[in-house]
Amino acid sequence: MAEVRVENVWKYYREEAGLEKRVEAVRNASFTCNDQEFLCLLGPSGCGKTSTLRMIAGLEKISKGDIIIGNQRVNNLPPKDRKIAMSFESYALYPPLTVYDNIAFPLQARKYPESKIKEKIKIVTDLLDIGDILSFRPAKLSGGEQQRVSLARALVREDALITLMDEPISHLDAQLKAKMRIDLKRFQREMELTVIYVTHDQLEALSMADKVVVMNLGEIQQIGTPDELYQQPANLFVAGFIGEPPMNFLPCTYIEESGSFFLKFLQSKFEVDTDLAHLLQAENGVNQKWLFGVRPGDIVIGREIEKSYCLEGRIYSIEPLGETSIVIVEVENQKIFVEVPGLPLEREGEVVKVYFSKAKSHIFNQTNGKALRI
Ligand SMILES: Nc1ncnc2c1ncn2[C@@H]1O[C@H](COP(=O)(O)OP(=O)(O)OP(=O)(O)O)[C@@H](O)[C@H]1O
């Protein structure tokens, strides 16, 4: 079975890179990619995604911890014995070979009959829309085409237990990327592939993955389905990294006044529900500092919505985007983004009431960034 288990894995760079100080690229990472699952490693540049993938592939030594593929611990197994197919951002195509032969290479090396090779190449090149460049050599291809050839070479491998991909569509234009996201996902389902996919692009991760592992500064921040990460981010990093435009954060203090409980902002405050008050009370007690978080789509301007908190603001600017508009409102000396359908009725400079959905609000500890489960 093609299950991948990453158990308490660390990666330090030092000796081999001749660095003075040790770089801890991956710190104690643990996650499981189940059989036939599409798992995305997501995070900003330098967070340790590629190092993690390269350790799974066997291209990088594991400093500490274990990687298990199927039932086998592969720490000391060379890449060729790990039954993995790979597609990396840097393509790694063979310059003297045509596109066809580049894709056919792993199959020819495994002595597949030519008719079977042709059949498989037809399926993946149709999928990736590169059927008309099969006789070209890599030097003649654009970055996007080279990337698709590299991807095709990984996808033809049906003997592979797992397919690893590192930013495999990063060099394609926006339209082709959108098509690829849909086609890749469908192909993975149909071919029942087990995929570990590295990307810094949250849209790719949210649209394709069954499970997302979010990383930052070498550490896993949260593991969950796209919906879980969006609805219940575990900390400030995940909350700010996932969602576009990003979540708004307003600093506040939890206070008590005459037996009632409030979140107090710079100038104003609102009373919190008993449930939230209990949680805040249990966590830290009064006078602690928090960040109140709410996504742009969970805010309404100028019209009271049921079960909401309210603050006052002034419209700073309006960005019409066709279907929706992004309204930037100054609230408590901070600019927040509000997503509204169509065009807003309000004008720049207008003072407005801003309503935040209670059910969609988030509270984060200002010191350690952890979310409080509301
Ligand atoms: N061979 C190496 N020698 C020394 N440091 C390295 C090496 N490879 C990666 N690093 C460092 O390890 C950290 C993690 O890098 P890694 O490439 O795994 O991150 P990433 O999330 O994949 O980033 P990117 O998306 O930019 O490739 C970074 O600080 C990087 O500079």
Image: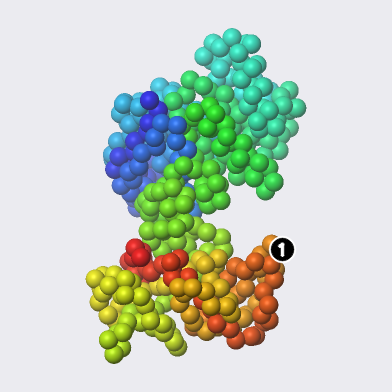
Residue 306: percent from left, percent from top: 49, 73
Q: Nearer the viewer, residue 203 or 50?
A: 203
Residue 326: percent from left, percent from top: 63, 69
Q: Is residue 67 left or right of residue 90?
A: left
Q: Is residue 59 left or right of residue 329?
A: left
Residue 355 visible in the current orientation:
yes
Residue 88 visible in the current orientation:
no
Question: Callout 1, which amino acid?
Answer: Gly
Residue 133: percent from left, percent from top: 73, 28
**Residue identified by numbered label 1:** 322
Q: Quadrant of the N terminus?
A: top left
Which residue appears at 67% of the width and 48% of the height? 174
Residue furthest toward the front? 306
Q: Nearer the viewer, residue 248 or 101?
A: 248
Q: Quadrant of residue 140?
A: top right
Q: Quadrant of the C terminus?
A: bottom left
Disc 1 element:
loop
Q: Is residue 198 above or below residue 258?
A: above
Q: What kind of colouring is applied to the model shown?
A: rainbow
Q: Crowding near pointer 1: few (<14 within 10 Å), some, many (20+)?
A: few
Which residue appears at 62% of the width and 81% of the height? 315
Q: Quadrant of residue 307?
A: bottom left
Q: Is residue 41 above or below residue 307?
A: above
